[in-house]
Amino acid sequence: MVGDQGGGPIPFPVYHALLTRKYLTSKIMPLLAALAVLLCTAMVLITWSVMGGFLSMLLDSGRKMVGDVSIVWPNTGFAHYADLIQRLEADPAIEAACPMIETFAVLVLPDDRVQMISLKGIDGPSFSRVIDFDAQLYWRPLAEGEGLPKAVDGEDLREDKANWPTLEQILEGGRRLAQYDPATGEWVPALVLGIETGDFNQRSKTGSGVYTPRAQLRARGDGGIDVISDFMPRSGSVTIHLMPLDPGGRAIEIVTRRLPIANEFKSGVYDVDRQSAFINMQRLQDLLGMSQALRVVPDETGVPHNPFETMIDPATGREVHVPPANTVVDPPRVTTVLIRAADPDAPSTEIKRRAEAIYAQFVAAHTDPVTGACDVPGTGSILINTWEDQNRTLVAAVRKETALVLFIFGFISLTAVFLVLAIFWSMIAEKTRDIGVLRALGASRAGVAWLWMRYGLAIGVVGSLLGGAAALLVVRNINQIHEWMGRALGLYIWDPAVYVFTEIPAKVDPVHAGFVLAAGIGSSLLGALIPAWRAARLDPVKALRFE
Amino acid sequence: MLLEVSNLRKTYRLGRVDVPVLRGVSLSVHKGEWVALLGASGSGKSTLLHLVGGLDRPDRAGRPAGITAQGVAAAQGVVKGEPSRIVFDGRDVTAMGQRALDKYRSNDVGFVFQFYHLLPELTVMQNVLLAAMVRHGRVAYTTRRGELQASARRLLDSVGLSHRLQHRPVELSGGERQRVAIARALLNSPALLLADEPTGNLDKTTGGTIMSMLADIRRATGHTMLMVTHDPEVAARADRVVTLVDGRVVSSPTPRAGAVAGAATGGSGGPTGPAAPPTPGGPASGGGPARSPIGVR
């Protein structure tokens, strides 16, 4: 920026460029300085990308799994939900709403293992309007180029055309939450399990995210072992135990059903994929006693109806059951209504506010004393939450942890400043006579200082760009690198059970990357500042005599 | 008169002791004159050269540069009388600001050092062009690149190094390095060439060759030369020998009649050379070698 001649500053003297290039390419020391900048830049960018990717995936998955806002009344559920959904969908800010039942179930696997799962009863078509359920169904035919980008050739059996007819049927089964019975030609209600549930599938060791079914072993009563090979969802079935609750939250009786597996889903959230299953909503309503039913109410006299009362039919002369005189219809109930906003960028708090207002109108319109009569938000069991509310603790923790880790790594990266400073200090000692020569040729103090600042800039740019490229390379292949470390060194750092997601999430944010690269260049310039000042202050006569 | 030095004083501080190096040196150099500064080691001749070249500043009147009042008292008798002055071509160098001094070093003087001081990473050609790169900005240099490169080539050809343009200093002999340094010093066509023991690091034969070369150049271009040496034999080739002892001029004969004028005729190859009017900045008008290093201003 500052030149030396003509009575004023000379912009960008040529000797700066020449000497910067020569010093960069003829010495090992500047390469070490660039390496220090590279490592620090890459370290911070990888950390930020992983933590940022983790946070981003956490937020995305939260929205992906529960929509923008959910209205929940656990256990008992609420009636007239169709009306509520109609009212919600009439609001222009709401794209769609759907009912869902969520309950706990005990899952008995084919190899007799037992685990607790969250069972969700959904109505396929309406659920898909709120949640992209179809995209989460894992077993489906995949044409070339549709598969996971990092899959090794032949690794993903979904790309094998020989499997496509079966996979087509399995996909359709997943959509219907049913399995086709070739014997009867009917679709039988079935479960859609999380891909990690029961360890039926094995995640690829290449880090590509591909699952392959694996054989299961089951101990026989006679001491032998059955190998349940090639557990495709089509060929297996599981047992579920459900505990219906009465409106007072008391257990009625345990319901047990054996159900086939229609398909498996992969949300990418480990806990969800490991501990969740979907079932047809009406089927679950039946099993939980939440479907439409007649309820007997006392007559005007207040005398309870005797359910065993009989009478003689005058027409037939036979004894028949006396139906209760006063009955009411209990409408079907659900525990949850999920809402999707019309504008994906709309603040979920606004959707929540609208949902609360609509719910209040809905309550006012349904004052009938039926089971699951509605409550007012905040005064009873009803919970109206945004997806952020539901993940608030975890999101806040991840945000804090991201800030903390970045602070620590950023602080560690200050070493780059001192490394550049030390290396430049040493180089200036080595180049003292060159500086004396430049001064003798007419270079100004500022010119000499800028020469070294420019040199620092060059090292910063080279180090930062290479560091950015290295970080990009690592981030893009982080799961493969992790799997390789596991195979080669036995070092598995990412535990899906701890870190929520089955794969290491990593996403390079261009703004973050720009900031880190600029910080890398800045740290190099900062490191060069004091040595440059020292170079400028050198006495040319002493510099020329320097031994 | 190209250079007038009057009452030049310079004191260095060594630890807590002030050491006067120049104790009131006065000297005049005519245009085209070749003056040798002869003296033993420590006599102050290199310091005088650095001061004339604008690499260092003389003591200010009443106080040596960079030395405290206490230091002045310690250096009794060092700072007395008229202030130190260096006047170059009518301009007071001692009064110049830093920027003007940088410009002066770049435009008006050229240095040749005992240890050549070539930049090892650069080729011969780049070392010579470095002087122009420092002098000109990017635009000016780029605009005149061809002209400057042609001048550098001519200069290197005139010192017999046209076949070494892309070599690095480490691949050259001592004499060749010094020739590169001479070419670098001449590229900007300075009015005054300052040579600090130019043969001090060379054997006698090579040193003789370098001296002949300097004489040829001076004869061809009419450069004014101020040369520091401790060797009376080398000094004897100059037009005039100024002897320094302990920071004082003890012998400064007046220029020989016709010595200055003889520069341009090639007659100053020795102390008794013939005289002719100089043609500064131009080629030899006769009697000199055919080679004609042409600087670019």
Image: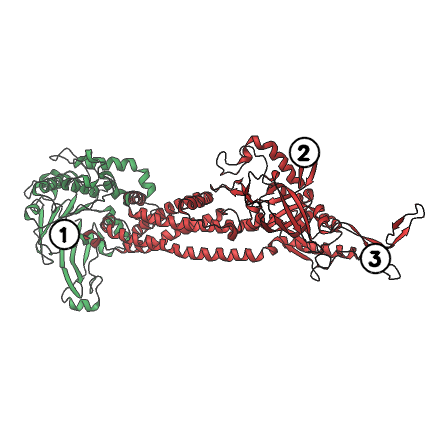
Q: Secondary structure at mark 2?
A: loop
One can see residue A32 in this view? yes
| Amino acid tagged 2 | Pro
Residues behind callouts 2 and 1 on a single chain:
no
| Amino acid tagged 3 | Val
Which of B128 and B72 lies nearest the eye of the viewer?
A: B128
Q: Which residue is mark 1?
A: B28
Which of A2 and A42 lies nearest the eye of the viewer?
A: A42
> Whole-percent x and y of residue B277?
13, 40
Q: Which residue is mark 3?
A: A297
Q: Earlier in the sequence, mark 2 or mark 3?
A: 2
* Dot 1: chain letter: B
Chain letter for red? Answer: A
Q: Which residue is mark 2?
A: A182
Q: In 3D space, how far apart are the residues under numbered discs 2 and 3 (Cα atoms)?
A: 45 Å
Given the current orientation, which residue lies at the most extreme right position? A314
One can see residue B222 in this view? no
Chain letter for green? Answer: B
> Whole-percent x and y of residue B197?
13, 48
**Is B165 drawn above or below residue A95 in the view shown?**
above
Q: Secondary structure at mark 1?
A: strand
